[in-house]
Image (cartoon, grey):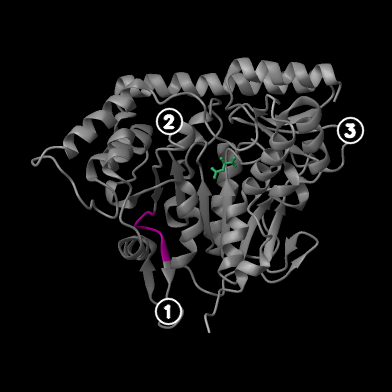
Amino acid sequence: MIKINENFLKLPESYLFSEVASRISKFREKNPGADIIRMDIGDVTLPLPETVINAMHKAVDDLATTERFRGYGPEQGYLFLREAIAENDYRQRGLGITPDEIFVSDGAKSDLGNLGDILGDNIKVAVADPGYPVYADSTVLRGLGGELKSGRWSRIEYLECNAENGFKPSLPEECPDLIYLCSPANPTGVALTKDDLRKWVEYARANKILIVYDSAYESYVVHPFTARSIYEIDGADEIAIEVRSFSKTAGFTGVRCGYTVVPHRLKGTDGVSGKEVELNKLWNRRQSTKFNGASYISQRAAESIYSSEGKEEIKRNVAYYLGNASVIRESLRRVGFETWGGEDSPYIWARKKGYDDSWQLFTELLERCHISCTPGSGFGSAGEGFIRLTGFNSLKNTREAMNRIINEKI
Ligand code: MLT
């Protein structure tokens, strides 16, 4: 008998973005001429910056020569990239993260889903609601979700984000072992200030809780009081793992590259001997066993964004998407939507009086305006009644989409 991981059967049959994509393609089949403007999944649309393209061409040429050919790379990522990350994303911002605390990945999603491998098999997990579905889904797959009741897993603690608390999660009531925190947040686009984050770090230190800090959208931060890295807060290196991605920073959704920081000072306890163990060592072991590294070409591409030209180009692209986000925010507000996010983030979180059901608003936008969004309820039960729109389309399409909403009087 082939025995399966029954936890897969507990999850809804399809992942949120697969469900959205499937509804869009069904609509397309029935309406072949419809010019659908995609504002659902956070997928970039601008071509890769020239610096990145040049670096990739050069990397391909390397692979074509006997002298510069590379086969398997280090599972932790090439040192050239880990040094560039440590220098530019941390040391130059006054943060002491070292290359051997950085693990290059093929993007944030895989690491967010896999980090549970190095944690105890009876831990209690807390997630923001609404939140990126990978946190709860991967917890369920480890058998740590309990039962699904009214859209929530019984063993997961939900940190409700709502209009009253400005979509900033409050500290947990029960003391979990692991908290997934995302800022600027997916899906709400709300970002934590350094003062907000200090409160989380102090709480986690006092209660010995691990924070997995998803900062995939840090390059969208423009306000000086908004945190970009959790390590900006003193003592965070004793309680936090930070997960980042080049997807939204540099347009790598198709190229695939990101990284995870596991500081040496971060230690867990062996439940049998009571001995303290560095999580860095465990993650290194996990990656060496289950991962063969991101491709050489992707890593050379990622390295190039830290050159002065690369930095300028990605800054321009991020500013472009932020400009679109501001068009969406302002336009929706003009027609009576309430909105959040879209300032330190490419995501706009919105609701309109009269629409209590996220999928209903999704369907109306699709059928009447030919615009796709992500229904807020897909991010958790507290997201019901909301939708998420992204600033990742072109400015032309963004303006067109907003005109359609205005003209259709949604
Ligand atoms: C999103 O739209 O939430 C993200 O693009 C999904 C992802 O990064 O996996």
The answer for how far apart the CA atoms under marks 2 and 1 are is 43 Å
Please tell me how crowded label 1 is: few (under 14), some (14-19), or many (20+) other residues with Cα within 10 Å.
few
Q: Would residue 220 be visible to someone looking at this image?
A: yes
Instruction: Assess whether mark 3 and mark 2 are in contact (beta carbons under 8 angstroms).
Output: no
For residue 259, side relative to residue 288 (left or right): right
Q: What is the secondary structure assignment of the residue under circle 2? A: helix
State left or right for residue 124 relative to residue 278.
right
For label 1, the residue is: 274
Circle nearer the N terminus (2, 1): 2
Residue 236 vertical position relative to residue 344 in the rendered view, above or below: below
Nearest to N terminus: mark 3 or mark 1: 1
Q: Position of residue 195 (x, y in %)?
A: 59, 39
Give the magenta-colored segment's residue range: 262-267
The verdict on label 1 being within 8 Å of ligand 1 is no
Q: Which residue is mark 3?
A: 353
Q: Residues within 10 Å of mark 3 (few under 14, many from 20)?
A: few
> Which image quadrant: the C terminus?
top right
Q: Judging from the image, what secondary structure is the residue with disc 1 in? A: loop
Q: Where is residue 263, by image quadrant? A: bottom left
The image's mark for residue 295 is none
Amino acid carrying label 3: it is Lys
Q: Is mark 3 within 8 Å of ligand 1?
A: no
Q: As drawn, which residue projects farthest toward the right?
A: 354
Quarter, ligand 1: top right
Q: Nearer the viewer, residue 22 or 330?
A: 22
Image height check: is 60 above or below 115? above
Magenta stretch contains residue 141 = no
